[in-house]
């Protein structure tokens, strides 16, 4: 068990994920930028989010939207400068907000200078920075590889796309017959870890508050149970505890028990992996679509919760840049219920930019920057009814991804003016969360109704000061359940609800939070 420091601010954090190229373009080149994010900090704060995660914004050829880094310590010129980033940290901190950058420790772009050196036949300080076999005719079993691209006689493992060579953190159990497989403790992997801690130090010193870590569970190769990768994260944790104990570390891993064991503070539930997250919003019959089943999600959630309680947190995102937009499968009032759930669960919630207004998946787009099917979830933010929906003033055909062209596309401006909009509901929900410590990251949770193929879903959130019963019914029929409480006081509702003699009745498409007494 790791004894890592826990940044206090995570207790009440609500995150907003910003895909920088699509948020706000201040210099009319058709692409979002850092000054655009700084300009919109007040909007994010008013939404009730006090922390942001910015997808990779470093120098890159953008073959995978910036997850193919060419210089870890330089802001991509299209987004601005390192000085702009510094100003963004300062402006966020002035508003009591925190900023996470995206750390991509597992691979670089094949244009990274480290890789260019590593490709050379002559031995040099970067020869072992990546995972190379010792012959062009031998591939690293179980991984994709690059071959025949330079004079070096070997194949190089790749992590994701073919242009993303895998950095060398070693093999969990190197095969003695394959001397190119190195142990975690050998010079090559230790050099990679040192280089990555230098990157973290660079941004943390500048004012960054921590990292969302890309593919955090896949550093060490041949590591089925992730024991080697956990060992690497322990080493990085020791560095952080020594130099930056307040830095928040959140993993893209999808297995909280492993991630938290490695010293992360939070782990995402994701559209891949064993968490059953897709049952909520993204499967053939999602629970929040009104005809699904939540019981397996709840069983898995509690399993993860019990394994991680007291040590780290589980965070549930509304979506992200890799998933279909939430509004593709959850519609109308049901979107409000999805947010009601997300914003009353433990761990810090994450709102993907635009989900708060129900931005749609833009169908039929050609892939942009390695997005493929993900491109439709990455279209430029819809702020208002001016040119390009207020994203920026470039010619509309200069937008690097086209926007939703439907006449009824949602915008921030229209929804701010409408008390009944999704955005207004999300603002009320973040205010509710902020007013009740039991609803925040560390408040306890107990599910009191989560039956197979049945509605509602109900859970009790509690801490030393209060106990709250939340119940959500995304189905199209009214439902009742025996709460087990004698008395309850309504503090929040969407749709209709009634509590009488211990029985809670929720109307179709409804949500309620009640204050209940300790029994
Ligand atoms: C996960 C990121 O979220 C995704 O966008 C990216 O393509 C892969 N990791 C590779 O870095
Ligand atoms: Ca721009």
Image (tube, helix red, strand yellow):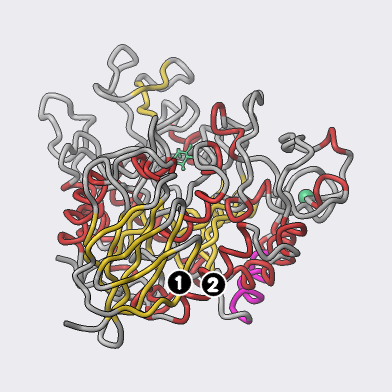
On the picture, is 249 further left or further right than 306? Answer: right
Residue 501 visible in image: yes
Q: Which residues are magenta?
A: 83-94
Reply yes or no: does residue 67 show up in magenta: no
Report helix, strand or loop for mark 2: loop
Q: Residue at x 41, y 80 (%)?
A: 436
Give coordinates of residue 323: x percent, y percent: 48, 38
Residue at image mark 2: 50
Closer to the camera in the image, 495 or 302: 495
Q: Position of residue 382 (x, y in %)?
A: 73, 49
Secondary structure, magenta segment, majority class: helix
Residue 303 placement, left or right of 256: left
Q: Is residue 202 above or below residue 381?
A: below
Q: Position of residue 227 (x, y in %)?
A: 16, 48
Q: Is residue 487 above or below residue 273?
A: below
89 or 295: nearer the viewer: 295
Report the residue marked by disc 1.
Answer: 13
Q: Quadrant of the C terminus?
A: bottom left
At label 2, counting other C-alpha atoms closer than 10 Å, the crowd grade (few under 14, some 14-19, many 20 or more) is: many
> Could you tell me if the residues under marks 2 and 1 are in contact, i.e. CB atoms within 8 Å?
yes
């Amino acid at each position: 068990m790791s004894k890592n420091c826990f940044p206090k601010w995570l207790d009440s954090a609500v995150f907003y994920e910003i895909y920088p190229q699509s948020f706000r373009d201040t210099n009319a080149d058709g692409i979002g930028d850092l000054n655009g994010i700084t300009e919109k900090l007040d909007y994010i704060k008013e939404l009730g989010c006090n922390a942001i995660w910015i997808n990779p914004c470093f120098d890159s050829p953008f073959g995978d939207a910036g997850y193919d880094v060419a210089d870890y310590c330089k802001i991509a010129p299209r987004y601005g400068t390192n000085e702009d980033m510094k100003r963004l940290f300062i402006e966020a901190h002035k508003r009591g907000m925190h900023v996470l950058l995206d750390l991509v420790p597992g691979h670089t772009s094949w244009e990274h200078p480290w890789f260019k050196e590593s490709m050379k036949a002559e031995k040099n300080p970067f020869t072992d920075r990546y995972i190379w076999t010792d012959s062009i005719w031998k591939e690293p079993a179980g991984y994709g590889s690059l071959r025949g691209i330079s004079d070096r006689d070997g194949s190089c493992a790749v992590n994701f796309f073919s242009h993303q060579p895998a950095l060398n953190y070693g093999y969990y159990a190197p095969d003695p017959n394959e001397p190119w497989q190195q142990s975690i403790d050998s010079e090559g992997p230790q050099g990679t870890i040192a280089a990555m801690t230098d990157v973290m130090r660079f941004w943390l010193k500048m004012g960054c508050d921590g990292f969302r870590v890309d593919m955090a569970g896949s550093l060490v190769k041949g590591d089925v149970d992730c024991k080697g990768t956990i060992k690497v994260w322990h080493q990085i944790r020791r560095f952080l505890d020594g130099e930056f104990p307040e830095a928040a570390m959140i993993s893209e891993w999808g297995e909280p028990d492993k991630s938290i064991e490695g010293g992360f503070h939070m782990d995402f539930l994701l559209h891949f992996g064993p968490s059953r997250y897709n049952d909520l919003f993204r499967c053939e019959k999602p629970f929040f679509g009104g005809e699904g089943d939540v019981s397996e999600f709840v069983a898995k959630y509690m399993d993860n919760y019990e394994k991680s309680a007291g040590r780290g947190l589980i965070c549930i995102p509304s979506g992200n840049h890799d998933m279909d937009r939430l509004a593709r499968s959850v519609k109308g009032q049901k979107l409000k219920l999805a947010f009601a759930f997300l914003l009353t669960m433990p761990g810090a919630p994450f709102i993907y930019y635009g989900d708060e207004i129900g931005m749609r998946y833009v169908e039929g787009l050609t892939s942009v920057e390695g997005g493929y099917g993900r491109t439709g979830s990455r279209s430029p933010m819809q702020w208002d009814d001016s040119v390009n929906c207020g994203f920026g003033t470039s010619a509309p055909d200069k937008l690097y991804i086209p926007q939703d062209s439907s006449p009824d596309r949602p915008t921030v401006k229209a929804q701010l003016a409408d008390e009944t909009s999704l955005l207004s509901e999300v603002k009320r929900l973040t205010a509710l969360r902020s007013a009740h410590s039991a609803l925040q990251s560390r408040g306890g949770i107990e599910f009191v109704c989560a039956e197979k193929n049945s509605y509602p879903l109900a859970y009790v959130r509690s801490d030393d000061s209060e106990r709250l019963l939340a119940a959500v019914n995304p189905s199209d029929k009214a439902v009742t359940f025996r709460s087990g409480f004698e008395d309850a006081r309504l503090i929040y509702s969407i749709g209709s609800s009634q509590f009488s003699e211990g029985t809670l009745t929720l109307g179709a498409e409804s949500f309620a939070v009640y204050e209940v007494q300790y029994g």
